[in-house]
Image: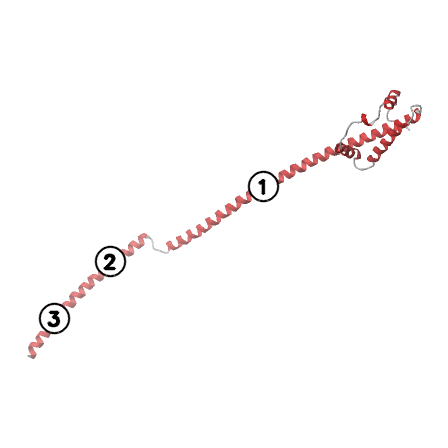
């Protein structure tokens, strides 16, 4: 089997002599474990199984006696290979996470812009409603003004009214003069009639 790394006796001895006991392990929270598992699982194409295999190889490697150097070296090479695969999977997942975060930021920015556009559109609609209300009032006033102008236009102008009034005054004066003349004529005829009646009375006596 081809090894991705060259093996040195110092590495083997260092790993073999490491006190792998619960007291020496670093305390990791459940959230950190889940996060690392998601990074290692990558796109769910067997990365999780590689982790399980790595753990099995590791415990198998530390359980072998030191004198079984050939088996320990083979398992150690397998461990390094699996670690490389896991590191690649983590890097790939991390890059995917960065891409997803950028996409998320992009969508959030678009949503924010859409919300701003919606808010601005709502303000524009309210402004248009107010403008429409004012225009309706203007149209109503315009119709009332046109009706008033039409009614005023049905009356004669000042000059025409003054001219008509002057003619009417002349007609009234003429009629008054005619009335006075007729009354004078009537009074004269009445006097003649009275004189005639007086003569008739004298003749009949």
Q: Secondary structure at mark 1?
A: helix
Residue at the disc numbered 2: 170
- Decide if residue 205 is on the left or right side of residue 126: left
Residue at mark 2 to residue at mark 1: CA–CA distance: 76 Å
Q: State yes or no: discs 2 and 1 in contact (Cβ < 8 Å).
A: no
- Frontmost of labels 1 and 3 is 1
Q: Are the residues at dot 3 and dot 2 in contact (C-beta closer than 8 Å)?
A: no
Q: Nearer the viewer, residue 86 or 153?
A: 86
Image colouring: secondary structure
The residue lying at 58 percent from left, 41 percent from top is 119
- Can you tell which quarter of the image residue 32 is in? top right
Q: Name the residue rendered at 64%, 39% in the picture.
A: 111
Residue beneath label 1, please?
119
Quarter in which the C terminus is drawn: bottom left
Residue 66's x, y, as percent? 91, 23
Structural crowding at the residue carrying mark 1, measured as other residues with C-alpha within 10 Å and reported as few (<14), some (14–19) or many (≥20): few
Query: Where residue 129 sits in the image (x, y, percent)?
Result: 52, 46
Residue found farthest to the top? 10
- Estimate the x, y position of residue 166 in percent, counting from the top left: 26, 55
Q: CA distance from mark 1 to mark 3?
A: 106 Å
- In 3D space, how far apart are the residues under numbered discs 3 and 2 (Cα atoms)? 33 Å
| Residue 104 vs residue 151, the one in the foreground | 104
Q: Name the mark on residue 192.
A: 3
User: How many marks overall?
Assistant: 3
Classify 10 Å Cα crowding around label 3: few (below 14), some (14-19), many (20 and above).
Answer: few
Nearest to the observer: residue 163 or residue 202? 202
Q: Quadrant of residue 105?
A: top right
Q: Disc 2 or 1, which lies upstream in sequence?
A: 1
Name of the residue lying farthest toward the bottom: 204
Of mark 3 and mark 2, the one earlier in the sequence is 2
């Amino acid at each position: 089997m081809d090894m991705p790394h060259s093996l040195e006796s110092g590495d083997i001895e260092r790993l073999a002599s490491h006190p792998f006991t619960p007291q020496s392990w670093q305390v990791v929270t459940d959230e950190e474990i889940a996060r690392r598992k998601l990074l290692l699982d990558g796109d769910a194409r067997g990365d999780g199984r590689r982790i399980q295999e790595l753990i099995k190889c590791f415990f198998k490697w530390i359980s072998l006696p030191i004198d079984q150097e050939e088996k320990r070296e083979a398992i150690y090479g397998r461990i390094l290979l699996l670690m490389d695969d896991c590191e690649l999977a983590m890097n790939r997942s991390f890059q995917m996470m960065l891409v997803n975060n950028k996409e998320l930021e992009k969508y959030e920015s678009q949503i924010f812009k859409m919300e701003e556009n919606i808010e601005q559109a709502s303000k524009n609609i309210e402004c248009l409603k107010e403008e429409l209300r004012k225009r309706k009032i203007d149209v109503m006033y315009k119709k009332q003004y046109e009706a008033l102008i039409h009614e005023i236009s049905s009356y004669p102008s000042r000059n025409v009214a003054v001219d008509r009034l002057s003619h009417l005054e002349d007609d009234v004066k003429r009629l008054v003069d005619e009335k006075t003349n007729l009354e004078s004529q009537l009074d004269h005829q009445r006097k003649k009639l009275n004189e005639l009646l007086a003569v008739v009375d004298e003749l009949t006596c």
